[in-house]
Amino acid sequence: MIRSVIVGCGSYLPKRVMTNAELAGMVDTSDEWIVARSGIRQRHIAADGETTGDLAEAAARDALDHAGLQPDDIDLIVLATATPDSTFPATATVVQSRLGIRHGAAFDIQAVCSGFVYALATADNFLKAGQFRRALVIGAETFSRILDWEDRTTCVLFGDGAGAIVLEAMEGEGTNADRGILTSHLHADGCHHDLLYVDGGPSGTQTVGHLRMSGKEVFRHAVVNLSAVINEALDATGLHADDIDWVIPHQANKRILDGTARKLKLDPSKVVVTVDRHGNTSAASVPLALTEAVRDGRIQRGQLLLLEAMGGGFTWGSALVRW
Ligand code: UT7
C-alpha cells in the first residue's frame, strides 16, 4: 500500500523576540503570571511587512533543502493558516509562485490550531489515492496581526512562525513497521465556535478583527478531546502509549501538555516542548516542534511519533507517524 513518508522538514521564526518583561510594560501582566499559567517565556513576532507567506516560503525552502529536493519535485502544496496574506488567493499559491512551481495544486486549509494536522491528513489522502506524488505541507501564522494588544488574557499567549514538511508517496507493507503516516483522525464540533474566534471577517464585518478566547473553557475541552483522539489513533493501529517515542503536540499551554501526558500515562520526557520559547503559533506549532526535535537529533529513523492538536471551532486531530 502507498504510505506518505516525511522525507524532510523545515522551519522559520521571525528574528524579533518579545519577552514577557516587554509585555508587562504594555498590559497589566507579569513574567510570573505568564510562566505559571502557560509556561511561555518569549515568542517571535514578524517584522513590519513580513507576512505569513514570507514565513511559509522560508520554512518550505528549509524543508526542501533538508529533503534534498527541488521545488519542481513538488506537485501539491497544502498550507494551514488562520492568518493568510489576503482573503484570497490562498497563501499556498503565493508560496507556489515564489518557489517557481507552475504545475500541480495549491490551497489553504483553515482549522486554526489544528490546521497542520488537518493539512497532513488531507495531503496523506491525496498521496494514498495516487493523485499526487510529493506534497509540501506547511503551517504558517502571523497571529500578532490579529491580537488585541490591550487584552492581557490573549496577547501574552501567541507568537508568529512557520514549519513545513515534505511528504512523499512510497510503497509500504501495510504494517505498523512501515515508515510514514500510519493513521490520522480528525474531528470538529462547531457548537463551540464562540469560545475561540476572531470578531471580524470579510463577509461579517469587512474587517480583519481580533482574537477572542474563553481560555478556561478551551482548556477544559482541550485535555479531554486530545486524550480521546490520541487513544483513537492507538486503538486504530493496535499500538500502545509505551510504543510512542515522541509526542509532538500543538503548543498552546505547558499545563495542557502536562495534563494530557498525565491522563494517558505518557512519559513527560517524551513530549517535545517549544511553547516556552515560541508561545502558541497555532498551525505552525507542530511542524516547528517536529523540526526542532529532528534537527537536534532527538528523533531518529524508525521511531514512532504522535502528532496532536486542538483549536478553534473546535477542531482537533491526531496522527501516528513512523519517522
Ligand atoms: O491553541 C488553541 C487552544 N488554546 C488553548 O488551549 C488555550 C487554553 N487556555 C489556557 O491556556 C488558559 O486558560 C489561559 C492561559 C488562557 C488562562 O489560564 P487560567 O489559569 O485559565 O486563568 P484564568 O483565565 O482563569 O484567569 C485567572 C486570573 C483572572 O483574574 P481573576 O478573575 O481571578 O481576578 C484573570 O483576569 O488571571 C487574570 N489574568 C491575568 N493576570 C495577569 C488573565 N490574563 C492575565 C495576564 N496577566 N496576562
Image: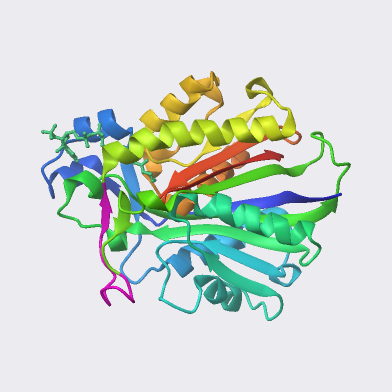
| Quadrant of the rendering where the C terminus is positioned | top right
At 64% across and 35% down in the image, what residue appears?
233
Residue 157, image quadrant: top left
Q: Is residue 219 magenta?
A: no
At 43% across and 40% down in the image, what residue appears?
251
Q: Picture coordinates of residue 186 (x, y %)?
A: 57, 48
Q: How many marks?
A: 0
Q: Main secondary structure of the magenta part?
A: loop
> Residue 222 vs residue 316: left or right?
left
Q: Is residue 11 above or below residue 57?
A: above
Residue range in magenta is 201-213
Q: Is residue 288 above or below residue 271?
A: below
> Residue 297 vs residue 168: left or right?
left
Q: Picture coordinates of residue 115 (x, y %)?
A: 51, 54
Q: Picture coordinates of residue 169 (x, y %)?
A: 79, 56
Q: Is residue 115 above or below residue 276?
A: below
> Quadrant holding ligand 1?
top left
Residue 68, image quadrant: bottom right
Colouring convention used in this rendered image of the protein: rainbow
Camera-nearest residue between 94 and 205:
205
Camera-nearest residue between 86 and 20:
86
